[in-house]
Amino acid sequence: DGFIDFLEFIAAINLVIRGKIDQKLKWYFKLYDADGNGCIDKKELLSIFTAIQAINGHTNMSAEEFTNIVFQKIDVNNDGELTLEEFTNGVEGDKDLMELITKSFDLSNILKVIQNGRRHSI
């Protein structure tokens, strides 16, 4: 119909997330790079991860802990910013970090809730 409703949006994101690793990492990077300058700083990562936690309810760790772990593990030159190369190489090279980032974007539960709510309202 020329418009994307919330369910379609979440479904599209879920499809992207199930793509190949390099595609997922580029998508994650673009999402985290809120100002579009080609780097992710701690403030951007903290802000986006806080929003993601609010949406999907994953609270295994605080947004601050998540941000600190990411930067400790993959900010190789310790400049407080992550380039696309640092991000993709760092996450691909760290199985635990990849799992953590992937789980943070798992929106399948939200899709189920929305679909169930939609069915009950019809």
Image (cartoon, rainbow, N blue to C red):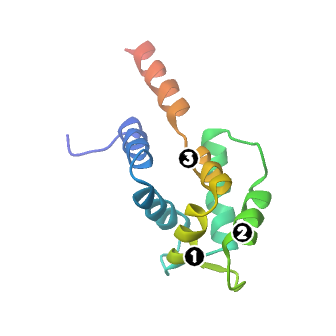
Nearest-to-viewer mark from 3 and 2: 2
Give the alpha-carbon distance from disc 3 to disc 2, as whole Å: 19 Å
52 with respect to 28 (left or right)? right
* Mark 3 nearby-residue class (10 Å; few <14, some 14–19, many ≥20): some
State the residue at coordinates (60%, 43%): 55
Front-most of residues 55 and 29: 29
Query: Residue visible at 50% across and 62% down?
Result: 31
- Of the residues shown, which amino acid type is indicated by label 2? Lys
Kind of element beneath mark 3: loop
Gap between marks 1 and 3, in whole Å? 20 Å
Residue 106 in the image, given as x and y percentages of width and height: 55, 41
Question: Which of the two labelled residues, at mark 2 and mark 1, occupies the earlier sequence position?
Answer: 2
Mark closer to the chain start, 1 or 3: 1
Q: Give the labeled residue for mark 3.
A: 105
Which label's residue is closer to the chain start, 3 or 2?
Answer: 2
Residue 99 seen in render: yes
**Whole-percent x and y of residue 85?**
51, 76
Image vertical order of residue 121 relative to residue 88, above or below: above
CA gap, disc 2 and disc 1: 10 Å
- Image: 82 above or below 117: below
What x and y, as percent, mark residue 2? Answer: 21, 45
In the depicted structure, whether residue 86 falls above or below residue 8: below
- What is the quadrant of the N terminus in the image? top left
Callout 3 amino acid: Phe
User: Element at badge 1?
Assistant: helix
Q: Are marks 2 and 1 in contact (CB under 8 Å)?
A: no
Which residue is the site of mark 1?
A: 86
User: Looking at the picture, which amino acid does disc 1 mark?
Assistant: Glu
State whether residue 33 appears in this view: no
**Position of residue 11 in the picture relative to residue 86 (left or right):** left
Q: Which residue is label 2 attached to?
A: 73
Q: Position of residue 38 (x, y in %)?
A: 49, 80
